[in-house]
Image: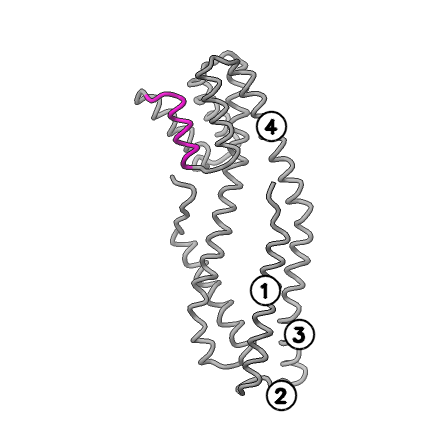
Amino acid sequence: MDYETYVLSKKERVTAWGTALIITWGMAYLFYKNVVIMLLATPVAFFLVRFQKKRWKEKRYWELNLQFKEGIQSISAALNAGYSIENAIYEAVNDLALLYEEDAYIIKEFQYMLCQLQMNQTVEEVFLDFANRARLEDVTNFVEVFITAKRTGGDLIRIISATSKNINDKIEVKREIKTMITAKKYEANIMCMIPLGIILYMWASSPGYMDCLYNNAFGILFMSVMLVLYIAAYLLCVRLTKIQV
């Protein structure tokens, strides 16, 4: 699997397109109250699907990163117990099976590594292939350290143990940051819903009060500016709550 390429499953495709169309049509009707404009806005759903696809890909990267941390810790423990690196990978698969489902990314990757090793590929080639497909900083750093230690005859057990600890510390920092900003994300989502709620409230409480903003040139221009500002504010909220470690 090339983790940089995310292919939507049938269920995800239906979910993404269904949600995107509901949001696109709902926003268009809320800001313009015009069925024609609502239908003309349909292509915008394509960008929302891409946005959702990007979020799912980021989620997959995060899950792979967490699973890789557990996998390296299992390999490190097996090496400390006296296993060779090849047998350590096999033992890691058994350990990971207790933590994750059979279709977990890291279990599939380690099983694939074992198959590659049986086809007489070296451990360095196996890990390098995984790093090239995963494109994760932690994976790349580990593989570079591992290959260097393997070729120079370094203390592989100590190096993998130290690298595992560094990866674990980094992921724990990421986890703490995610926990800290979760509440802020909820607040940002609520704030983004308030303008839409105000429009709906005006529709319900004062029918006809906002008619001057619909189906005329000035109203369309004004609501278009408001929509652009609303989208810009939402994207700014997303950017501010996205912290890279």
Q: CA distance from mark 1 to mark 3?
A: 18 Å
At label 3, the amino acid type is: Ile
Q: CA distance from mark 2 to mark 3?
A: 15 Å
The residue where tag 2 is placed is: 208
- At horizontal 63% and vertical 64% (from top left) the residue drawn is 192
The residue where tag 4 is placed is: 166
The mark nearer the N terminus, 1 or 4, is 4
Which residues fall within the magenta stretch? 121-133
At label 1, the amino acid type is: Ala
Picture quadrant where residue 245 is located? top right
Q: CA distance from mark 3 to mark 4?
A: 48 Å
User: Judging from the image, what secondary structure is the residue with disc 1 in?
Assistant: helix
At label 4, the amino acid type is: Asn
The mark nearer the N terminus, 2 or 3, is 3
Q: Nearer the viewer, mark 2 or mark 4?
A: 4
Report the magenta stretch's main SS.
helix
Image height of 131 relative to 234, above or below: above
Q: Nearer the viewer, residue 232 or 5?
A: 232
Q: Nearer the viewer, mark 2 or mark 1?
A: 1
The residue where tag 3 is placed is: 198
Mark 1 Cα shell of 10 Å, populated few (<14), some (14-19), many (≥20): few
The mark nearer the N terminus, 3 or 4, is 4
Image height of 168 relative to 121, above or below: below
The residue where tag 1 is placed is: 232
Q: CA distance from mark 2 to mark 1?
A: 28 Å
Q: Position of residue 14 (x, y in %)?
A: 41, 59
Q: Nearer the viewer, mark 1 or mark 4?
A: 1
Mark 3 Cα shell of 10 Å, populated few (<14), some (14-19), many (≥20): few
